[in-house]
Image (cartoon, rainbow, N blue to C red):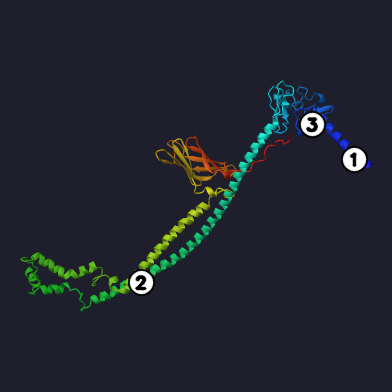
Amino acid sequence: MFTNCSLGHCHIVIAVILWSICVDSRKIRGISLSYKRFYRERKSFLCIDGSKMIPFDQVNDDYCDCMDGSDEPGTAACPNGRFYCTNLGYRSHYIPSSRVNDGICDCCDASDEYRSQTPCQNTCRNLGQRERAEVEGQTRVLGERLRLKQLLIEEGVLTWREKQAQLRDLQRVSDDLQTQLDDLRKEEARRKEEADSLREREIGARDTADNSPTSPYRPESPISVFKELDSNRDGSITVDEVQAKLSPVQDEEHALSEDEAVKSTIWTSMHFEVSSLIKGRRGVPGSLADEDPNIKAAVSAAEKAAADLKRVEDAYETVYMEIRDLREKLSIDYGSEREFLFLHNQCFQLKVYEYIYELCPFSQVTQKSASGEVVSLGKWGSWAGPPENPYCQMRYESGEPCWQGPTRNTMVMLICGTETALRSVKEPSKCQYVMELQTPVSCQPALRQRGIHSEL
């Protein structure tokens, strides 16, 4: 029984202490809970800045005693004072103390007009409900955008891995093709050498046969022809001697003239050499490849080796270009989580007046006029955001020069949105452009909302 009474007595004592604290502070208007400890009623009051000690009954007496205005939180006496609006059910905030009892309702709980004739209504509950509904709606929208952002991040990571695997595969193909090229170059050189060797041997063999006395292709020497034509052995040849030795060439009633006889003699002694030049070899009419099956097979093998080499060289060049493009793509900074990778190879357009602006992220920005003329507004440069958020701005530079002006450059501002689209284009200064690209990947989790009293 004694124990229970003691406990009850303790509870009563605690309640009295709390009540006394509230009584001490209940007459002090315009202060927050965190400042109530400075306004506990006692004989004196110390200005919060510590500059002065005044009797406590001078607090809120409509006369400014403290330099920091802390002695008049509930009146308009101090020019630098401030009044705290509790605004139960809505957001608490401070207003300048000059607005206290000025006939205008500044606090939604009407606490600032406690001596005013203005009938202020407490609207905190309605304002709080409305703001909470707005915040909830914004939270849902932001949640959806963050969900889309996460999907794009996952897509970017997956694409990055695929591109890395593709690069490795292409590198292996390139290595295999390089090995094939080395082998085919050797094979092509060997086949060509074999064909050339067979040609040279055959030509040498036929040259030897042509120079034999019994060869049907052996040409008559100029001396033997001269001796045959010089019938009187006087050491000179006359036209009559030439005409006598040559068979007449007649067309009905026409015989060889003296000039024709001389030309025919020269042709007779030189026809073999001329024929050899025309046929492409000495003493043997026709083509070696046409006559010798071994040479023909060797030439065919050399041509096939050359064709195989050309085919592999073309394939290697194609793979090399793909590797170069892929490495260039993978070298770009697509964000800390590669969340911007999905923008690569995409372009976004926006028509402003007679111009069509096109932004191709990580590539270029262009402007197309109604006449079809396309002007470069800059090529991809780098990210240009502040250190705390570097991926919020893109810089495109070194576009086409303006007439009597600077080189065109574009700054792209990335803003949070549900869909990815080009939203605005401006030219704040000559040939310097600013664009807004909306995309979910630019959304950030919301900071903690300012406190809203839920008590109603």
Q: Is residue 448 left or right of residue 148?
A: right
Residue to which mark 1 is pinned: 7
- Residue 194 is marked as 2
- Residue 232 percent coordinates (x, y): 7, 74
Name the N-terminal-most of marks 1 and 3.
1
Q: Measuring 56% from the left and 55% from the top, which residue is drawn there?
A: 161
372 in relation to 235, above or below: above
Name the N-terminal-most of marks 2 and 1.
1
Q: Measuring 53% from the left and 45% from the top, which residue is drawn there?
A: 382
Quarter of the view holding residue 402: top left
232 in relation to 69, above or below: below
Residue type for callout 1: Leu
- From the viewer's perspective, is the residue at label 2 or at label 1 nearer? 1
Q: Are marks 1 and 3 in contact (CB under 8 Å)?
A: no
- Residue 82 percent coordinates (x, y): 72, 28
Q: Residues within 10 Å of mark 2 (few under 14, many from 20)?
A: some
Residue to which mark 3 is pinned: 38
Quadrant containing the C terminus in the rendered view: top right
Q: Residue furthest right?
A: 2
Depth check, front residue: 299 or 101: 101
